[in-house]
Amino acid sequence: MPRPTPPTPAPPPDGYRTELVRSIELLPDGLWEQLAPPDDPIWARPVLLAMERGRIGPDGYAYLILHQGPEAVAVLPLCLFRGLRLDDVVGPRERRLLAPVRRLFPRLLRVPMLFCGHLLGQGRVLSRGQLPPEAVPPLLAAVLALARRERLGTVVFKDFAPAELAGLRPALTAAGFFFLPALPDTRLRLDRSSFEDYLEHLPAKPRRNARSKLRRAAAWPGLRTEVRTDFAELLPELLGLYRQVMDRADQTLDLLDASFFAAVHAADPAGRRLVACFEQDRLVAFLLCFFSGSGATGARIGLDYRIAHAAGLYHAVHHAAIRLAIDSGCRHIGFAQTAYQPKLELGCELVEQWYAMTHVRPLPRALLRRLLPPALAAARADALGPDHERYSHATR
């Protein structure tokens, strides 16, 4: 006697279901381009592909697709860390306190984490507008189910702007997430007709400092700055200069490698440029820039600290990137979450960002709620420096 056919599972009450794929290349054709922000180049497909092809930190990537009926309506990128080094993502003060633990019990500092959002940029759920409230719980349930399945106890929605977080907040709160201020992003509005016009409209002191830095770079023997689309022969030097910067970094959640730079170079040159600074024929600084629509991003920097201060290399590559973005018709350029004082002097605004965080088990969740806020607040205050209090009051 034939077995009865099992009943077809009923669809979720609101018609939503989720699907998990392990590469951006496995998303439905055209979906990423339909949903990704057109003016935020860090969200361009080649950047995500370069992340997947490099060994920059995560042990794996995934993309959670939210379907409503037959239509894919949202995508949430995920990064899987099976043993994130806790002392690599806190500030220098906390790292000193953790140094004895690292020596005696290194395994205690390895934390399995699931990051939701973009590892190298501002977090968001990609969709055609804010998701309706009923769409968020199924998405969040799938995130937590993946965390449990992969044994990634800590779950973090990373670097979400308040507007991006607003529609998620009720469901996140109901699921036990708590919220912490993250390091702000930096963005420079480009509403001037030329680089000289940009300089003229800086406040008096930053304008004087900018012109002084430009003169310093111009006077350095043999120093020149170029914009390159083809930089294949520079890839080994890029990595060396980048590592000089990362060796001095307070936090190293991601660490770009040779395969990442090679994958970026292999991408469409229209979407990326290298601002390269040479002393004679020796590369001494670079800023890797991405372009999309009316937006630009100065994503990662490398500096030769042998002459970095004396020759003003940091400002040389940033000024060249600003000039390039203005000449390319961009309306804004973003920079990384580091070196806030120089970026404020360039005219950048600080863009408020937040973490939403939980643990899949109640006791670790309670410990995170108690221990993480003061540690992250201290690291944030160290990073912001003199502007910590001003920025904290401005964003409450």
Image (spheres, helix red, strand yellow):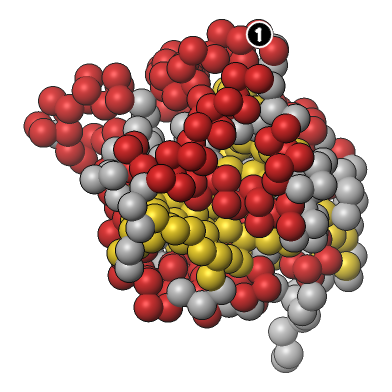
Residue 325 lies, in percent from the top left, at: 69, 54
Q: Residue at x 30, y 25 (%)?
A: 92
x, y percent for residue 301: 44, 50
Q: Image quadrant for the C terminus?
A: top right
If the image is split into quadrants, where does the N terminus sit?
Answer: bottom right
Q: Secondary structure at mark 1?
A: helix
Q: How many marks?
A: 1
Examine the rendering and report whether any part of residue 142 can be seen. no
The answer to which image quadrant residue 196 occupies is top right
Closer to the camera in the image, 255 or 315 = 315
Q: Using residue 221 as the reference point, say whether residue 34 is left or right of it.
A: right
What residue is rendered at 78% in x and 68% in y?
A: 33
Q: Amino acid at mark 1?
A: His
Q: Position of residue 305 (x, y in %)?
A: 28, 44
The answer to whether residue 293 is visible is yes
Q: Report whether 136 appears left or right of 92.
A: right
Q: Residue furthest bottom?
A: 1
Q: Examine the image and state in which quarter residue 308 appears.
A: top left
Residue at the extreme left: 104
User: Mark 1, residues whose alpha carbon is within 10 Å: few (<14), some, or many (≥20)?
Assistant: few
Q: Position of residue 214 (x, y in %)?
A: 51, 41
Asked whether 396 or 178 is in front, the reply is: 396
- Reading the image, the residue beneath label 1 is 393
Residue 352 lies in quadrant? top right
Image vertical order of residue 361 relative to residue 379, above or below:
below
